[in-house]
Image (cartoon, grey):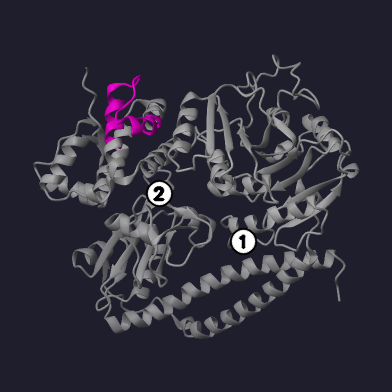
Amino acid sequence: MSVPPPVTVTLAEIARLAGVGRAAVSNWRRRYHTFPEPAGGTDTSPQFDLAEVESWLRAEGKLRREEDLLRWLWPQFDALDGRTAAGEAIAAVAGAASADGAPDGLGDAQRAAVREALAVARTRGVGPTYEFLLERWLGAHVRQVTTTPGQLAELMVALAAPSGDRPRTVLDPACGTGGLLLTAGHHWSSRRRLDLLGADISPVLTRLARGRVATAGLPRSVRTQIRTGDTLRSDVWPEERADVVLCNPPYNTRDWGHEELATDPRWVFAHPPRTEPELAWVQHALSRLADGGTAVLLLPPGVAKRRAGRRIRAGLLRTGALRALIALPVGSAPPHSVGLHLWLLRKPAEDAPPPTTLLLVDAEDGERTGRDPRPPVDWDALLRSVPGLVQAYEAGATPARTAVRSTVVPVVGLLDEQVDLTPARHVPADSGSAARRARRSWGEFTSVLGRLEEISTALAPLRQLTDDGPQPSMTSVDELLRAEALHLHGGQTLPREAVHHGPRPRGAVPVLTVADLLHGTEPTGWLGPHQVTAFGEHLTLTAPHDVVVAGTSQLFDAWVEEAAPMVLVPQILALRPDRDLLDPWFLAGCLRSPGNTRQAGSHSTHASRVDVRRLKVPRLPLDEQRRYGEAFRRIIELERMLGRAGELGKELSSALSDVLAGGRLL
């Protein structure tokens, strides 16, 4: 048997494994002559043998492996030769757990990684171990493998049976790693048998999906079969008729079988054009439904309006197969820059008259402001309101008033030249909402103007400032750090899958990112309290009165953090002053001075950065610093209030225009 190649890790990975910052690892390399030599990589990005690193950390008393076995497990799989090899090994963990060994058909390195995972699973459990490996694998290949976010999967499942019915058979013809099937299994599991059927063109994804469902702890009444096959060209479930079809099909594919499937009996409404593969998936889903069954598909917005698909859309409307179309907020699922649509379809019974209306739901938030242009998706609100709207519509009742706008449109009014089903074109604007926005914006705008007047009065003495007179000597941040009047804490990299989004629960710690600064929003991500404890020293947490600095010249800013704690990521750092020597507001005001940052900027590349250590600060007594700090604080507040006044002014003018356009001038 050949010996598998050594597993290598970078300096950043060593820091993550040891639970320290990368600077600490670099320091170890300089201080300890026994630190392992590089086993590969380059001079600027060396790689080290994982076994040697583990041995060295253990000998020096720096090993944290016992605290987080999973953290040490991933490099074994990440080092395998490519995405497919790693995926096969992860899928093998589920099957090997009961057999107490790696299955046949794997290479030596894969078998070694599986054995390591099984050893961890004995302590942590097979389910958590498998889910951790799958999440890391998906995170490493996020651009190649599309998944359905868990909260969106819950919404799709809730829409499939809004009245609470329990289906007997659920099919996902493009199941990927099985997220929709797993959600359906948890939602509809009971003592009655539930069959979960899946298919995917990728053998690796089908294996991963089988392992995911098998290790999820579903009851025995849930039976799962997932097969590999090209659903459109050669369906692996041709005879099945499911109660529910859930699907997030591949988008914008051109090689989906347009020519060879020209006479396929599934195309009841028309042969899908080559540029409309999503409408092929829609018709396939309908063909695999039992009478009265429901399908929920996640589709790009263009499917609702592209001219090439208008004939098929018209057919779906005339027969009543399309029951509702829901426009989701931007960021609900990949690709996050597009607001996707949910199509709710139902297989009409042969003797039932076709419905004459269509439910259109626009779940986009119409009250976004310039300060918060893309807030996190409020999944709780969507799960509360959208299934209720669908249930009321199907029952013929008037839906309760919700924050989500909707309308019921006669089918005959949609059957025009375009057959454009985009909800935003048909759902009327809420004039009452515009009036409420106008009142709220006007109140805030008036308050901001009052605060601006107060700040202006307080800063009035600064009109007498002059450049004449002696200038105090200057010191640098680097000198202050060496004198220990100041301590620097750089932001640390976090695994993508560790950061949660959406409404922040009590006790959670916000995570400030560069994207938040770009959009001018409050932190959109957060970590739970247990995660903060688990990451330990690997996190950079702010403390009250820290000076937070964004280190790129494009976004450079400095401010005093008063709402601590907050987690910082790379390119954002915290300066913690000794308050007996330095006033935080004085320090922040000096650092963010435009002239100061220009001198400290580095323009050696197109992505210029500000070298914080080179920034200058006047040498002043503490009492004098506090006087300056109070002036800086008011200047910073002036800048914030001016920006807020501009945002509120735009919001107010927009809301007032909507109110007046609705004929509501008093």
Between disc 2 and disc 1, the foreground one is 1
In this image, 204 relative to 185: left or right? left
Mark 1 is on which residue type? Gly
The quarter holding residue 486 reads bottom left
Residue underneath mark 2: 608
Q: Main secondary structure of the magenta part?
A: helix
Tell me what residue is drawn at x 63 percent, y 59 percent.
381
Segment colored magenta: 91-117
Question: Height in image: 396 above or below 400?
Answer: above
In this image, 407 relative to 367: left or right? right
In percent of width and height, residue 203 lies at 48, 24
In percent of width and height, residue 341 lies at 68, 43
Mark 2 is on which residue type? Ser
Query: Residue reaching furthest right?
Result: 412
The answer to which of 422 and 655 lies nearer the viewer is 422
Residue 363 shows in this picture? no
In percent of width and height, residue 395 lies at 80, 52
Residue underneath mark 1: 370
Is tag 2's residue or tag 1's residue first in the polypeptide sequence? 1
The answer to which of 372 and 207 lies nearer the viewer is 207
